[in-house]
Amino acid sequence: MHEILVHERALMRYLLRSWYRRDEIHDLRQDVYVRVYEAAAKARPTMPKSFMFTTARHLMTDRLRRARVVSIDAVGDLDALNVLIDEISPERRLSGRQELKLLTDAFDRLPDRCREVVWLRRVEELPQREVALRMGIGEKTVEKQIAKGMRLIAEYFYGDGHAQHGSRHHAAVDAGHGDGDGQQQAD
Amino acid sequence: MASSRQIELVASAWLARRDGNGWSAHDQLQLDAWLQEAIAHRVAYLRLDAAWRQSDRLKALGAGMPAGRVPERGAWGLTPLPESHATPSASGIDAGPPVRSAATDRSGSSSRTMYGAPKSGPRRRLRYAAGLALAVLASLTWGWRHYTAVEQSSYRTAIGGLQDVSLPDGSVITLSSDSRILVTLSRNERHIDLQQGEAFFKVAKDPGRPFVVSAGDRRAIAVGTRYDVRRDAADLRVIVTQGVVRLEPDNGPGGRSQPTTLLPAGSIALASDAGVVVSSDSVQQAEELLNWRSGFVSFHDTPLASAVAEFNRYNVRKIVIGDASIGTLRVGGNFRWSNADSFVRLLELGFPVRAVRGKDTIVLKRR
């Protein structure tokens, strides 16, 4: 799994560049992972990265074929899909220090409350119950903030948060489920 | 079919619940069921789990920070990453440990959240003046030392050896014959790498520091319990005599994904490439397999070939089955494992077996 996740950033860049509907990118990414996972269960791909990009290209082509109305833009973009993968995103192996920097950036991008919860739980290693006590919020809220923290850190750390900017839809979902602000008084 | 966003929400909710208190075997079953439902579920789960594990490394930043305070954004003293296309070597990241370089940054403008202070708004922050700088530095030195204080030691036994290892946390490891472990104790985890052989773990309770025994591509995790892990080539056996142990694949590079298994007391789990088989016996029966700790091996209707293999774990002078047809004979009883000779003599008395005693081997033949 790790071998694949390190390329998420490149994959997202590729999808963003190639796919005309931003709101579908999150789904596309999932489909890519599902395909890669299925394939890896049978035999580990020798070149996981190019395998992943080829998969992405096939999926986009499939989607275009299935779409009833294909915009001229999309067809034009499809040609771009054939660009050599390694030109699109040169291989980047991050050093431990760079990864830490990336991680802190991801952490710093979290909303205030979520950031506090993640810090107390992850760095100070307080149990969720303890975090709730310290912050004077409910345990359920802490759990929700942790779930949210995971999603955002994954998004920022692996994918550079492209899907965030790309989709209004996500923001709406987050406000509905992820954020416990509305609950605080009740707790 | 749920959208990928919804799946991600559910996956994160599961992980957050698992991260919390009161995760039960029932919860685990439900989670397993959900993961089995669709590959999309599994993929989303693994991805978030990987990210959450990564975030563990934020602890490197926590070293030296006073407890209970969340530092300001960007107060890390890490230089920014170069543009995303640059090569790693071109990065301007300095060589010093992050917390040290952070010292100068933080002593300058120290504003942070503090718990216990009256809270009226979401962004209540207390402003500190330069006087704090000294305190920060002091705790920084302490914290840095604390953070780097990762104790590592390795232990090994020769064939026939048996050794009790007491860890600083109060846990005791009994190392079986011809076994090797590497113990790493850090602030957040007690990690034992079982490199060879078998060991019994009597784990002192410490919920904040899970006790993780890794063996090849699997890990057996406990908080406070007693269990045994034994490694035979690619196979792994885990016996739990108290508490609950979580057996999971070690998702290292290329981690094959296999479900996590919760093992209550009395479980005997055999893990191989094919998967995990768990038999749940009484704790007493499970204990019997662990008699090696007091110098005995116990057999119940055990094929002679397995019994011999068991003896050979503990003895340099190996017993060899010279005639395949006797390997299936069934034997029972308690034997002192250091005394293979008397075991062989008993075999000669009760079974159609003849022993040819050499210097390094005892060959068993059909009489």
Image (spheres, coloured by chain):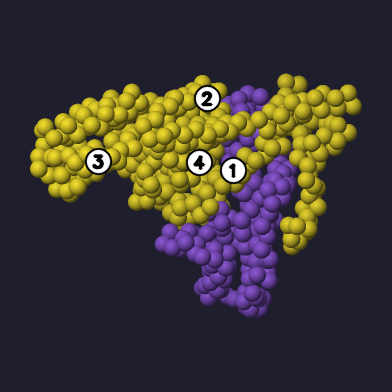
Chain colours: A purple, B yellow
Q: Residue at x 78, y 58 (%)?
A: B90
Q: Residue at x 72, y 37 (%)?
A: B61
Q: Amino acid at mark 1?
A: Trp
Q: Residues within 10 Å of mark 1 (few under 14, many from 20)?
A: many
Q: Residues within 10 Å of mark 4 (few under 14, many from 20)?
A: many
Residue beneath disc 4:
B14
Q: Of B271 and B8, which appears nearest the observer?
A: B271
Chain name for mark 1: B
Looking at the picture, do discs 2 and 4 lie on one chain? yes
Q: Residue at x 68, y 48 (%)?
A: A96
Q: Position of residue B103 (x, y in %)?
A: 82, 34
How many numbered marks, from 0 up? Answer: 4
Residue beneath disc 3:
B358
Using residue A49 as the reference point, say whether residue B72 is left or right of it: right
Residue beneath disc 2:
B167
Q: Do tag 1 and tag 2 residues touch (Cβ < 8 Å)?
A: no
Earlier residue among tags 3 and 2:
2
| Quadrant of residue B95 within the rendered picture | top right
Q: Amino acid at mark 3?
A: Gly
Q: Position of residue A2 (x, y in %)?
A: 56, 53
Q: Amino acid at mark 2?
A: Leu
